[in-house]
């Protein structure tokens, strides 16, 4: 532990001094092992004896990308269902059993993946494997649980999207930017689909996508690899593999003209999203795009914050960027407009900054800062077993190799100013842009009440 702290202090010192992050300690990947179970499940181990705990993450290759009209939102729905009961553990017992053993859990769903996360002391390893094996092999999909959780998910959608201006605008932006590919619908699903899922749809979806042959299990923490592999063979290998998932073959046609959408809702200030199509994560431009994203949007010294928030004082905040993606995705810039300012003024300033980057490559100092920020974030993630588990699983899904992501610092270092300028020219042009604007409207009921009050008083 003392060595780790010394390395961490060295890293912060190097970053603060502007020294190349390549001088920081190399990542030791020698203990990382990958195995394939006979049922098709991939298991990845990285022992870390710094604390007597483990992180066990299960990455299922299923998200909204694998859905279709009529069953949108099913991946997110199963994020809920996987905690509601199975053959040997009834409703609520998964959480209670894990917590009694000193563990905790969570899960999340994205466009391409669904990830289940377990954190627990090493003494609870056998219990955790029993829990995970039971819900993979024999999840309960009964009408009572389905209807109960359907209501929970519908309520979540109303709260997190229908009543949230930024998320509603984001949903509009994706729906407008994509015409063919399944990235066009939201991870949580459309409400009309949530209300109409059928039990048969759920059963087929579960058998196909939550099978061991569609998953990567990552374990990081205080264990011996031979013992951990034995647990996997004992509890997970007997689970039957499922049918091969249908490949997603739809390719989004090239966008050949700017698209615009307008959302009118009750709001105090306007907002806008300007998005641009970019390649999938496995593309050669990925690491340079991460540097570009950091340069534009990371922190209060980023270009867009300095221009829109600090200098021109047009916006309250600017944020966004890109996420990991198996298929070509979006680079999005969200702008929350300052009260009294037109959204068009923010849009013009944003466009001007992107055009400046196309005309003038960034200075070496600015590029160095972005690379340092990325390196710092990466090494911080390596400081925890959870961070390591997330990195390994993400790398396996999006790069096809659990270790691939561990050389990102050297890949960031290879990005030059000319690369940034090339990307800005390639992707940040008008015909590749989709702009969605939130136009504030006053509360109509309030307006009526006010008018009636004035009439009564006259």
Image: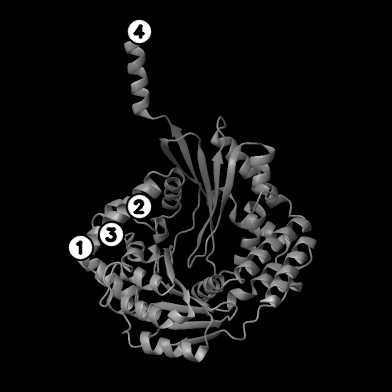
CA gap, disc 3 and disc 1: 9 Å
Q: Mark 4 or mark 2, which has the lower sequence index?
A: 2
Mark 2 highlights which residue?
156
Comparing 59 with 92, the one in front is: 92
Which residue extends farthest top? 458
Q: Mark 1 or mark 4, which has the lower sequence index?
A: 1
Q: Mark 1 or mark 2, which has the lower sequence index?
A: 1
x and y percentages locating residue 363 in the rendered image: 77, 55
Q: Secondary structure at mark 3?
A: helix
Mark 3 highlights which residue?
149
Q: Mark 3 or mark 1, which has the lower sequence index?
A: 1
- Residue contact at pointers 3 and 1, CB within 8 angstroms: no
Marker disc for residue 194 = none
x and y percentages locating residue 433 in the rendered image: 53, 49
Q: Secondary structure at mark 1?
A: helix
Comparing 237 with 343, the one in front is: 237
CA gap, disc 1 and disc 2: 19 Å
x and y percentages locating residue 44 in the rendered image: 50, 82
Mark 1 highlights which residue?
144
């Amino acid at each position: 532990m003392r060595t780790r702290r010394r390395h961490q202090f060295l890293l912060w010192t190097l970053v603060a001094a502007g020294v190349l992050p390549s001088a920081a300690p190399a990542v030791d990947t020698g203990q990382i092992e990958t195995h394939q179970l006979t049922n098709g499940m991939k298991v990845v181990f990285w022992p870390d004896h710094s604390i007597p705990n483990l992180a066990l993450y299960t990455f299922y290759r299923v998200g909204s990308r694998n859905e279709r009209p009529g069953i949108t939102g099913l991946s997110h729905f199963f994020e809920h269902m996987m905690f509601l009961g199975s053959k040997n553990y009834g409703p609520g017992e998964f959480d209670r059993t894990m917590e009694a053993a000193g563990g905790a859990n969570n899960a999340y769903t994205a466009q391409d993946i669904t990830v289940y996360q377990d954190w627990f002391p090493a003494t609870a390893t056998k219990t955790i494997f029993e829990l995970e094996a039971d819900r993979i092999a024999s999840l309960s999909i009964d009408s009572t649980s389905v209807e109960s959780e359907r209501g929970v998910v519908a309520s979540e959608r109303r709260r997190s999207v229908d009543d949230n201006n930024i998320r509603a605008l984001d949903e509009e932006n994706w729906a407008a930017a994509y015409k063919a590919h399944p990235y066009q619908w939201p991870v949580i699903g459309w409400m009309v689909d949530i209300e109409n899922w059928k039990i048969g749809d759920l059963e087929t979806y579960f058998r196909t996508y939550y099978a061991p042959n569609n998953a990567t299990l990552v374990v990081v923490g205080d264990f011996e690899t031979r013992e951990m592999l034995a647990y996997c063979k004992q509890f997970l290998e007997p689970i039957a593999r499922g049918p091969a998932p249908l490949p997603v073959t739809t390719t989004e046609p090239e966008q050949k003209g700017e698209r615009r959408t307008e959302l009118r809702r009750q709001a105090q200030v306007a907002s806008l999203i300007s998005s641009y199509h970019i390649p999938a994560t496995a593309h050669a431009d990925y690491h340079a795009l991460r540097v570009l994203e950091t340069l534009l949007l990371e922190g209060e010294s980023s270009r867009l914050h300095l221009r829109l928030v600090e200098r021109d004082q047009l916006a309250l905040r600017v944020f966004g960027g890109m996420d990991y993606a198996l298929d070509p995705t979006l680079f999005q810039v969200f702008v929350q407009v300052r009260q009294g300012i037109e959204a068009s003024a923010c849009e013009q300033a944003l466009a001007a900054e992107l055009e400046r980057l196309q005309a003038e490559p960034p200075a070496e100092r600015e590029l160095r800062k972005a690379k340092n920020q990325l390196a710092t974030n990466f090494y911080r993630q390596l400081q925890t077993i959870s961070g390591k588990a997330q990195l390994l699983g993400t790398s396996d899904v999006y790069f096809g190799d659990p270790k691939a992501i561990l050389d990102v610092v050297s890949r960031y270092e290879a990005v030059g100013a000319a690369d940034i300028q090339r990307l800005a020219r390639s992707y940040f042009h008008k015909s590749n842009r989709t702009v969605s604007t939130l136009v504030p409207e006053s509360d109509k009921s309030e307006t009526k009440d006010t008018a009636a009050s004035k009439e009564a008083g006259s």
